[in-house]
Image (cartoon, helix red, strand yellow):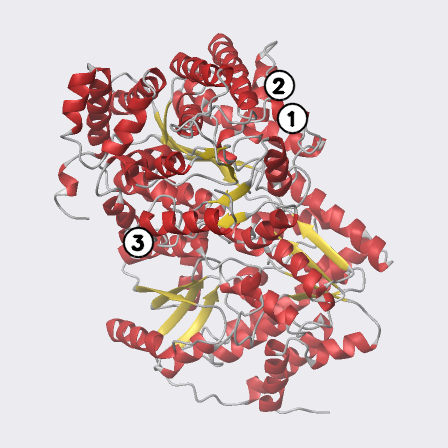
């Protein structure tokens, strides 16, 4: 790693960036416009956030607070847990543990900083991590491995049986940093009793691990509070999900990011509830006026992102969608499967989780059920074309949300989806959905520049006569 | 017929590298089924207990991936791609079925790619196809799950092949395969002397043959080979003692490249051969428990997350045992589990003064021997 990069702590730089972004957005319109002159490289992102006033500001505030928590965790006597986006943080937050979620922490500087996270990504290889491993963690991970962050206390991940490259990163980090490790392991099956029992037992072991690491017991009241707040959030998400089915889709494309990034960082926290309420307000207003959430107000095409989004610098992906009149119908990251989710009405999707609050035991069961439906954990744990897995979910979403096409965006590090995305795309095409496979890296533009990615996307939309 | 050492080795090499070798042909002539499996965590004893010959699925001899690439994406390990290609090229037509285990993500997706390829190539459509789900951790419920999986496999094998796999027949199969393991152990012991009494490539061929032929036939050939070797003088020169570790490895080209550079390969820590097979399965425990202990608890693959210390200890033990002076860590490109583990192991071993080198390669015959040879030469200079 270049010596000058090592002069500054990664989390502190992020903390500063988020405070500047937040202060700028909170300023008067005149102050904000003036400030944009000093942000040549992420003007597009700031503008994108600024366009939506309250939801944009609340989102930045939520992220700012999450980064603050990390930076000041040890000062406040809290433990820090390195973890992954597909682990629901409810149990960590209920035990006063600060989650350091690798993927959002990679996305943030990727879209915020001109140089992205390349130095940190490369540092992972310097210390022995495979150079073909997933880029979604590496951006932040390099900084943690280099000791440029508030040190973590332990590692928890839940991608065993779900995604090797994800799981491998956390196992590697635990060994490299010599920190305790816990993994939730998932069978390939999903709804049968045996699988549920396995998940229940595994989650109880996670709770014991956390109790050992924190020296505290999981408290009934704190967990209940967290789950009640999660339930409130789920109800709002369900309302947004339902409105997203309308034609035109009243949801601005960037709101998908707000929804899942907030979920990964702050499920069960009141700040996330506030953000969701504000988002719902905007979406509902658009729906009442029969307006699309796109800036132009005109929806030309509805695209379902069957995997993840693309996090180019300056958030150009969302601006690309906006500019071309393409509605974003969500991705694998933005669906969480509570039992009241509107998409569960479709026969092709299984029943969702139900939050029970009667006893501590019930609540832990609920956590296990929530986690078993986390992005990736639910739909790519087994063969893609078996019941409840990726193909069934994607086709059901595509039908329910009246998608005109399906877009795959991922990373070359994703052994799991690259192992079957070609047959998957063949199947979705057979069902009548034009499908585009993006060969770029969602977190690393060195693999394919966004200019090339966007040209190929534009070509797909044009050639398939979608716009 | 009495075969000389050289002929015996030829027979073993044919068994090791011909996917449809003479022993398998002979087995099939008796109308006995053959089932392919993908992972060293699949218990071979279970098949054999039902009169089914288990053979490890491999893709040796493949020259390209034109068919496999139509199903797999580009960022995938070439090992499962080679299996798919072999199947598509009709090199595995002797199979009556296949068991795909979720050893790693690239390998588990062989299940879907194979099934989809069967739509286009009817000969790939095997009458028996089973997906085996193996936990990636060791816990009480993981142990239960593994036993549940082998019970499921037992039941489907019984139904499909109209056989009767019983506790007794599994126990007998355990004893049979343990006999093979003991012979491999004897072969391995020949590598411990300095210089070794058998070359690394010949010793590894024996281990590969064990996974590609009926155990009784293997035992006969190997016993004869051992007897013959004991009466022969070897002309293996003294050289640096090297251990190979890392990704699945089932050919001898890398070993030959190292040996032709003047070193002796004295052991392998890869998922073909002794590291995964040599330790005997317990004959005292109930059969399912014994299989679980061997194939789940003792598994040295980095797919078992959180067990790095266990694997490091095993590797150190092996290094000590074979008196290795240098370690060649190799990984197939896109094998993230081994590539990353190699990085960690290298760090730990170098700290203790054990020289290591990390090489990345593709599965199968080396297409870049020159590059590897240059790096190996430089490495040997370091440790000589």
Q: Chain of mark 1?
A: A
Residue that badge 2 annotates: A340
* Secondary structure of residue under mark 2: loop
Q: Residue at x 48, y 36 (%)?
A: A300
Alpha-carbon distance for marks 2 and 3?
Answer: 50 Å
Q: Nearer the viewer, residue B89 or A4?
A: B89
> Quick check: B14 above or below A75?
below
Q: Are marks 2 and 3 in contact (CB under 8 Å)?
A: no
Q: Nearer the viewer, residue B202 or B131?
A: B131
Residue that badge 3 annotates: B347
Is residue B192 visible in the rendered structure shown here?
yes
> Quick check: A462 above or below A77?
below
> Quick check: B129 above or below A170?
below
Residue that badge 1 annotates: A344
| Residue A135, image x, y percentages | 37, 46
Closest to the camera, between mark 2 and mark 3, is 2
* Secondary structure of residue under mark 1: helix
| Residue A412, image x, y percentages | 42, 52
Q: Nearer the viewer, residue B158 or A120?
A: A120
């Amino acid at each position: 790693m270049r010596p000058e990069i090592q002069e500054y702590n990664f989390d502190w730089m992020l903390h500063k960036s988020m405070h500047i972004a937040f202060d700028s957005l909170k300023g008067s319109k005149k102050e904000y416009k003036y400030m944009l002159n000093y942000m040549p490289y992420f003007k597009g992102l700031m503008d994108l956030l600024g366009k939506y006033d309250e939801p944009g500001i609340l989102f930045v505030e939520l992220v700012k607070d999450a980064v603050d928590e990390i930076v000041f965790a040890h000062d406040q006597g809290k433990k820090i847990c390195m973890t992954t986006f597909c682990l629901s943080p409810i149990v960590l937050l209920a035990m006063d543990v600060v989650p350091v979620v690798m993927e959002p922490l990679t996305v943030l500087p990727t879209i915020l900083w001109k140089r992205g996270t390349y130095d940190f990504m490369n540092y992972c290889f310097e210390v022995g991590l495979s150079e073909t491993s997933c880029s979604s963690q590496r951006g932040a991970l390099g900084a943690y491995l280099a000791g440029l962050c508030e040190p973590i206390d332990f590692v928890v991940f839940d991608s065993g049986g779900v995604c090797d490259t994800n799981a491998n990163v956390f196992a590697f980090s635990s060994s490299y940093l010599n920190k305790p490790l816990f993994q939730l392991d998932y069978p390939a099956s999903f709804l049968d009793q045996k699988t549920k029992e396995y998940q229940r037992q595994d989650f109880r072991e996670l709770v014991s691990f956390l109790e050992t690491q924190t020296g505290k017991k999981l408290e009934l009241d704190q967990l209940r509070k967290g789950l009640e707040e999660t339930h409130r959030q789920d109800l709002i998400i369900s309302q947004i999900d339902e409105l997203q089915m309308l034609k035109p889709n009243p949801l601005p494309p960037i709101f998908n990011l707000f929804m899942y990034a907030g979920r990964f960082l702050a499920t069960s926290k009141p700040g996330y509830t506030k953000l969701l309420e504000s988002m719902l307000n905007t979406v509902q207003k658009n729906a009442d006026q029969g307006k699309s959430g796109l800036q132009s107000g005109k929806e030309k095409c509805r695209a379902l992102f069957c995997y993840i989004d693309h996090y180019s610098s300056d958030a150009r992906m969302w601006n690309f969608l906006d500019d071309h009149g393409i509605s974003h119908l969500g991705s694998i990251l933005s669906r969480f499967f509570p039992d009241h989710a509107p998409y569960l009405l479709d026969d092709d999707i299984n029943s969702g989780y139900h939050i029970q609050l009667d006893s501590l035991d019930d609540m832990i069961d609920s956590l296990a059920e929530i986690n078993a439906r986390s992005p990736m954990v639910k739909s790519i744990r087994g063969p893609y074309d078996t019941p409840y897995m990726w193909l069934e979910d994607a086709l059901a979403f595509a039908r329910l949300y009246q998608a005109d096409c399906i877009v795959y965006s991922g990373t070359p590090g994703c052994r799991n989806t690259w192992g079957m995305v070609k047959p998957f795309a063949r199947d979705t095409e057979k069902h009548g959905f034009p499908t585009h496979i993006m060969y770029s890296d969602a977190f690393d533009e060195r693999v394919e520049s966004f200019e090339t990615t966007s040209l190929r996307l534009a070509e797909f939309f044009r050639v398939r006569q979608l716009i | 017929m009495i075969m000389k050492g050289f002929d015996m080795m030829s027979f073993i090499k044919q068994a090791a590298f011909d996917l449809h070798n003479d022993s398998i042909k002979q087995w099939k002539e008796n109308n006995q089924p053959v089932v392919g499996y993908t992972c060293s965590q699949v218990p071979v004893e279970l098949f054999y207990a039902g009169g089914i010959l288990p053979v490890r699925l491999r893709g040796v001899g493949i020259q390209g991936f034109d068919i496999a690439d139509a199903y797999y994406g580009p960022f995938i390990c070439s090992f499962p791609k080679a299996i798919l290609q072999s199947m598509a090229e009709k090199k595995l037509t002797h199979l009556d079925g296949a068991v795909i285990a979720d050893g790693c993500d690239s390998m588990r997706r062989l299940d879907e790619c194979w099934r989809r390829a069967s739509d286009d190539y009817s000969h790939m459509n095997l009458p028996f196809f089973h997906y085996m789900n193996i936990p990636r951790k060791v816990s009480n419920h993981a142990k239960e799950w593994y036993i549940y999986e082998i019970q499921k496999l037992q039941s489907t094998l019984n139904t499909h092949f109209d056989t009767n796999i019983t506790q007794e027949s599994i126990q007998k199969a355990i004893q049979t395969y343990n006999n093979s393991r003991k012979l491999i152990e004897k072969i391995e012991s020949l590598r411990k002397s300095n210089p070794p009494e058998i070359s690394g490539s010949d010793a590894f061929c024996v281990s590969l043959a064990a996974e590609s032929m009926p155990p009784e036939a293997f035992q006969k050939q190997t016993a004869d080979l051992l007897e013959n070797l004991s009466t022969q003088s070897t002309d293996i020169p003294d050289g640096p003692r090297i251990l190979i570790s890392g990704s699945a490895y089932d050919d001898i080209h890398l070993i030959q490249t190292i040996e032709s550079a003047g070193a002796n390969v004295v052991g392998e820590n890869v998922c073909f051969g002794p590291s995964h097979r040599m330790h005997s399965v317990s004959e005292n425990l109930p059969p399912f428990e014994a299989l679980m202990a061997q194939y789940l608890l003792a598994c040295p693959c980095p797919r078992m997350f959180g067990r790095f210390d266990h694997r490091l200890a095993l590797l150190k033990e092996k290094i000590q045992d074979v008196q290795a002076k240098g370690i060649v860590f190799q990984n197939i490109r896109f094998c993230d589990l081994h590539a990353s583990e190699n990085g960690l192991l290298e760090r730990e071993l170098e700290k203790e003064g054990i020289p290591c080198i990390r090489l990345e390669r593709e599965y199968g015959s080396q297409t870049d021997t020159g590059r590897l040879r240059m790096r190996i030469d430089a490495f040997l200079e370091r440790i000589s």
